[in-house]
Amino acid sequence: MSKPRILITGASGNVGREIVQALQRFHADATDIVIAATRLRAGKSGDSAMETVEFDFMRPDTVKAALRGVTTLFLLRPPPISDVPRFIAPAIDAAKAAGVRHIVFLSLNGVEKQTRTPHYAIEQYLRTSAIEWTFLRPSFFMQNLSTTHVEEIRRRNEIFVPAGKGKTNFVDVRDIGEAAAHILANPDVHKSQAYDLTGSTSYTYDEIAAILTSELGRTIRYANPSKLRFFWRKWREGTSITFTLVMIYLYHQTVKGAAEVYSPDLLQLLGHPPHTVSEFVRDARGVWLE
């Protein structure tokens, strides 16, 4: 019987990188069975000698070539791509034509109530694709604090989001990567399953600021701006109006309690407790230091 071939899209991003590293940790033959898909040219992936392939949803020729011989696909939608019928659905069709048997899709927590999102459209398309599927639905990434919010924390000692007193559940991308790796290595056990991936605790942004203060050794405050003030600053920073409005919508949902979620799914998939926010901040503290 031939070995499985696992293709990881977005392998150079936060989630994809963690999946690749988790597969390498847990599976001795990962170098032989895992293919890292990026928009870069094909070759070898650093010291690991892992195979890489060029994969660009906007270039169907790269998609078709990357899927040759693949049995299991980790599907991640690039944030700039929202036109599912034009770019994502054809990639799913190409996977079916190439003989891919199972697709693990990184979706969105609460997606079943957010029917206008690309994630919802992708889930619905996969359900009718005749390919086995598994959906991963994570809550807010802890890594948002070290990427999206890194400059405001590092330079202004504040978290600047209009989330009021609403609570948010944060999940560590490292835990998502580990859970996804277990599923990709044994997909038949997880077919037709949708997993809500959350941390163990939900926090207000005042509580997140207090954790950052404790771990970084300096005062970090939660600014709690109005939506108008938030929009104005993002406009001055050059953030696109569309993206700013999406953020305002998401934080409005947080105020209403939609981000205060918990599921035991991640604990069960990992077999151990997921990382806490304090652990994440401690491990990543260097990014917030001048």
Image (tube, grey):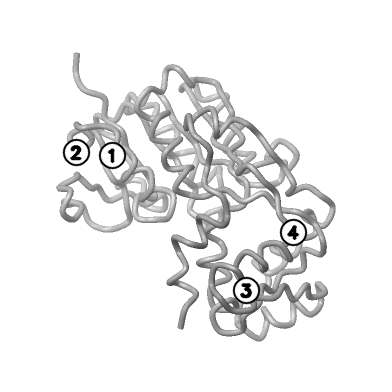
Query: Residue 204, labelled with which disc?
Result: 4
User: First in sequence: mark 2 or mark 3?
Assistant: 2
**Picture coordinates of residue 104 (x, y %)?**
46, 33
Residue at figure coordinates x 32%, y 26% from the top left: 71
Residue at figure coordinates x 71%, y 69% from the top left: 161
Q: What element carries label 2?
A: helix
**How far apart are labels 4 and 2 at the CA level?**
41 Å
Give the residue number, with chain letter if any, for mark 3: 240
Asked if the residue at tag 3 contacts the one at tag 4, i.e. Cβ–Cβ closer than 8 Å, the answer is no
Give the residue number, with chain letter if any, for mark 2: 31
**Picture coordinates of residue 4 (x, y %)?**
26, 25
Residue at figure coordinates x 40%, y 27% from the top left: 96
- Pointer 4: residues within 10 angstroms few (<14), some, or many (20+)? some
Instruction: Indicate left or right for 100 with 169 as reference.
Output: left
Q: Is residue 226 above or below residue 37?
A: below
User: First in sequence: mark 2 or mark 1?
Assistant: 1
Q: What residue type is labelled 2?
A: Thr
Q: What element carries label 3?
A: loop
Asked if the residue at tag 1 contacts the one at tag 2, i.e. Cβ–Cβ closer than 8 Å, the answer is no
Total labels drawn: 4
Q: Which amino acid does label 4 sit on?
A: Thr
- Of the two numbered discs 3 and 1 in the rendering, the one whose residue sits closer to the viewer: 1
Give the residue number, with chain letter if any, for mark 1: 25
**How far apart are labels 4 and 1 at the CA level?**
34 Å
Q: What element carries label 4?
A: loop
User: First in sequence: mark 4 or mark 3?
Assistant: 4
**How far apart are labels 3 and 1 at the CA level?**
39 Å
Foreground residue among 58 and 119: 119
Q: What residue type is labelled 3?
A: Ser
